[in-house]
Structure formats: structure tokens, C-alpha cells
Amino acid sequence: MKPQLLKVANSPVQSFSARRDKVPYVNNRWHYHAEVELIYFKEGNGTQFIGDNIKRFRTGDVVLVGAHLPHYWRFDDNYFNENEENHADVVVVHFSENFWGSHFLNLPENKSLKLLLEKAHRGVQIPDSHSAQIGELIESILLHEGSRRIILLMEALIAIDKCTDHQSISSIGFRHNFEETENERINAIYNYSLANFKRKLQMEEMAAIANISPNSFCRYFKSRTRKTYTQFITEIRVGHACKLLIEDSMNVKQICYESGFHNFASFHKHFKVITGMSPLNYQKSFLKK
């Protein structure tokens, strides 16, 4: 698929970028950049796209995204409504892999740090048990100047490396295609799907959005994303169901239909395949936490 190349601006007096975003629409599209990205969602929920992986992101999440790995975080619709109480609060750090010098990562003491950045080429999801501590380290980078900023970034990366249960996000076989013509097309498919997943979507309808023939759409989508469009839309629906289960404001059958499924047995089956547990067990597991 074709993400948009993003140029990350650096201050002439700082070797890497750190910022706080309080709005949900900053870089709100499928993109990549030459820098590694370390992101902490202090406040915010939505759908996360990294490589060929789709899942929910939520308040407290910390993610490490390697250089040139396409990604996109789309906040839930209620974050775009000024009357809602929900507000985005995200701390983002961008740094080049060699900003500390071309030989730094080759030092024997930094072997594990170098391996972590290699793992980040697929994206690294930090487990909930460590995200609060690492999130605080990321946030503290904003409050410091000089060498302390670099030390805090290293401390955050070392803390991630010590998490033995962190998970790779994108599949090992994911490859991205940077042809310029793909950018708007894949964005159109993503955005239309996210806006309309609650109803039945026809292939002819999606082909029209992509501006290709219906016979070519399925083949095109799988060649760019390594999954069928049916898999893609099912993952979005299950992700939305996860959000509703966590909110605990509807019963499971209501959630099934509110998430775009038209058959309860099908909903139960797909939910278990994607999350590894039934909807009720997922809800109990989250509420227990």
C-alpha cells in the first residue's frame, strides 16, 4: 500500500523531536517517515493501523514504530466533537536510528538496544504492565533540555527492551510499496470503511471508492495489505465491538449488531478468532483489570 512520506521537522538546537498533541487529527492519515517513532497515548482511543495489523488503541498505550514502517492512528469519532468530554493527549518522539552517531549502536554495551530498533521495523507494542512507567519517561522528555533528554530517551528504550512480553505488531512478511499513485486510493478505502463498517459494504461500492473495477478490487486490496477486504472489515468490526464491551453500556447481542455483524453466531466466531476469547470473556478480562 502507499503511505504518505512525512518529513519530521527538527529544531536546530535538538538532535531529536518530542512534542505533545492535544488534537486528534495531527498526521491523521496513512504515513511513514525515516525516523523511529515512540508514542504514548496519555488520553485517547481509536483504531490503530501499523503495517498489515489493525487493532484498537486506548488510553495508556505505548508503541514503538520503526523507520519507514507505515502507520495511522484514527481517533474515534467522538474526539472530533467539541461538545464531547473526551480529549486527545499524545506525546510523540521521533528520532533517527543514528542520531547519537554512526558507531553508537555498534558498541558492545548497546547490542540489545540495536536489536530492539531492528524489532521496531515491525512495530513493538509495549505491554500494559509496563506502559505507565514508560509513558512517564516519554512524557518527562518534554520537560528537560540538554543531555538529560537523550538520557531519558535511552531509559525509555532500555525499559522497553526489558519488557520480555512486548509484542511485534506487523507480520514478518509485510512489505510496503511506495508508488506515489497508491497514497490517496488506500486512504480513501480506509476512511470510507471506517465511516461505513456498521452496514453491509458491497465490493462494487468499494471498487468505486478505489476507482478500479469490481473484478480488480479484491486482488488489488490483498496485494497491498496482505489480507482480504473481508478480513480487513471484520477486524474493524471486532475492534469496535471491543470498544463497546469495554464501555459495558450494551448487552452482547446489541453490540453484535451495532458493530456491523448481522448474525450472532458469526460475530461470536470472528471475535474469538481475532481476540482469542469469547466476547463475554473479553469483557470480564478487561473489567477485572
Image (cartoon, rainbow, N blue to C red):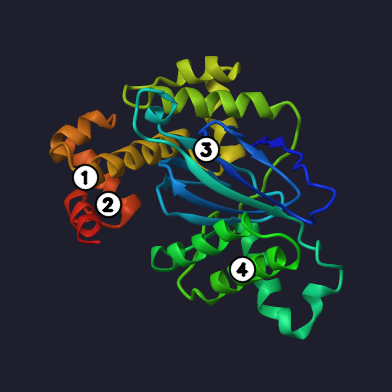
Q: Earlier in the sequence, mark 3 or mark 4?
A: 3
Q: Position of residue 66 (x, y in %)?
A: 66, 56
Q: Earlier in the sequence, mark 1 or mark 3?
A: 3
Q: Farthest bottom residue? A: 108
Q: Is residue 277 left or right of residue 176?
A: left
Residue that badge 2 annotates: 272
Q: Which mark is residue 268?
A: 1
Residue that badge 3 annotates: 22
Q: Earlier in the sequence, mark 1 or mark 4?
A: 4
Distance between the Cα atoms at labels 3 and 4? Answer: 24 Å
Looking at the rendered image, the disc whose residue lies closer to the viewer, 1 or 3, is 3
| Residue 221 seen from this side | yes
Q: Earlier in the sequence, mark 4 or mark 2?
A: 4
Q: Which mark is residue 157?
A: 4
Looking at the rendered image, the disc whose residue lies closer to the viewer, 4 or 2, is 4
Q: Is residue 117 left or right of residue 274?
A: right
Q: Residue at x 69, y 63 (%)?
A: 149
Distance between the Cα atoms at labels 1 and 3? Answer: 36 Å
Q: Residue at x 48, y 22 (%)?
A: 192
In the rendered image, the quadrant that contains the C terminus is: bottom left
Looking at the rendered image, the disc whose residue lies closer to the viewer, 1 or 4, is 4
Secondary structure under the numbered disc 4 in the rendered image: helix
Secondary structure under the numbered disc 3 in the rendered image: loop
